[in-house]
Image (spheres, rainbow, N blue to C red):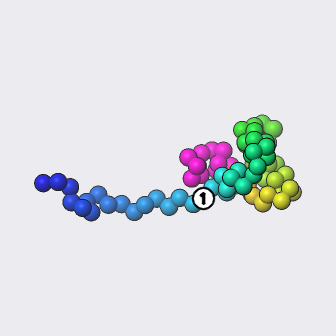
């Protein structure tokens, strides 16, 4: 006999939107490229430093979402 309809049912994994991805989606192409470059340069841009500069420019974000995004611990992974 085949598998029961509800056999093996597990609760879905809750995936909250990544703040960094949300910001990237809201930027124009030029600004998006700049931010992607900064996110990839962990030597020049610390998580705190990047968060601070973005917030000064009106893009409100803390270091935690930046760190999680960089480490692949966010819903983008």
Write down the quadrant of residue 16 in the picture: bottom right
Question: At x 63% / y 55%, what residue is drawn?
Answer: 18
Q: Residue furthest left?
A: 1
Q: Which residues are magenta?
A: 67-77
Where in the figure is residue 17, as x and y percent of width and height? 60, 58
Picture layout, residue 6 above or below residue 30: below
Q: Is residue 31 visible?
A: yes
Question: At x 29% / y 57%, what residue is drawn?
Answer: 8
- Of the 4 image quadrants, the one containing the N terminus is bottom left
Q: Is residue 25 left or right of residue 14?
A: right
Write down the quadrant of residue 29 in the picture: top right
Q: Is residue 73 left or right of residue 5?
A: right
Q: Residue furthest front?
A: 28
Picture layout, residue 55 above or below residue 33: below
Q: Please tell me how many numbered marks the rendered image carries.
A: 1
Where in the figure is residue 33, as x and y percent of width and height? 75, 41
**Magenta-drawn stretch contains 49:** no
Q: Main secondary structure of the magenta part?
A: loop
Q: Residue furthest right?
A: 56
Mark 1 residue element: loop
Question: At x 76% / y 49%, what residue is drawn?
Answer: 28
The residue carrying pointer 1 sits among few (fewer than 14), some (14 to 19) or many (20 or more) residues within 10 Å by Cα, namely few
The one of 34 and 70 positioned closer to us in this rendering? 34
Q: Would you name the residue on which mark 1 appears? A: 17
Where in the figure is residue 65, as x and y percent of width and height? 68, 54
Q: Is residue 20 visible?
A: no
């Amino acid at each position: 006999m085949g598998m029961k309809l509800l056999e093996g049912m597990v609760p879905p994994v809750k995936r909250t939107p990544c703040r960094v991805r949300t910001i990237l989606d809201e930027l124009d192409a030029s600004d998006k490229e700049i931010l992607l470059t900064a996110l990839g340069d962990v030597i020049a841009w610390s998580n705190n430093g990047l968060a601070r500069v973005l917030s000064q420019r009106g893009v409100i974000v803390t270091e935690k979402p930046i760190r999680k995004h960089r480490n692949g611990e966010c819903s983008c992974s």
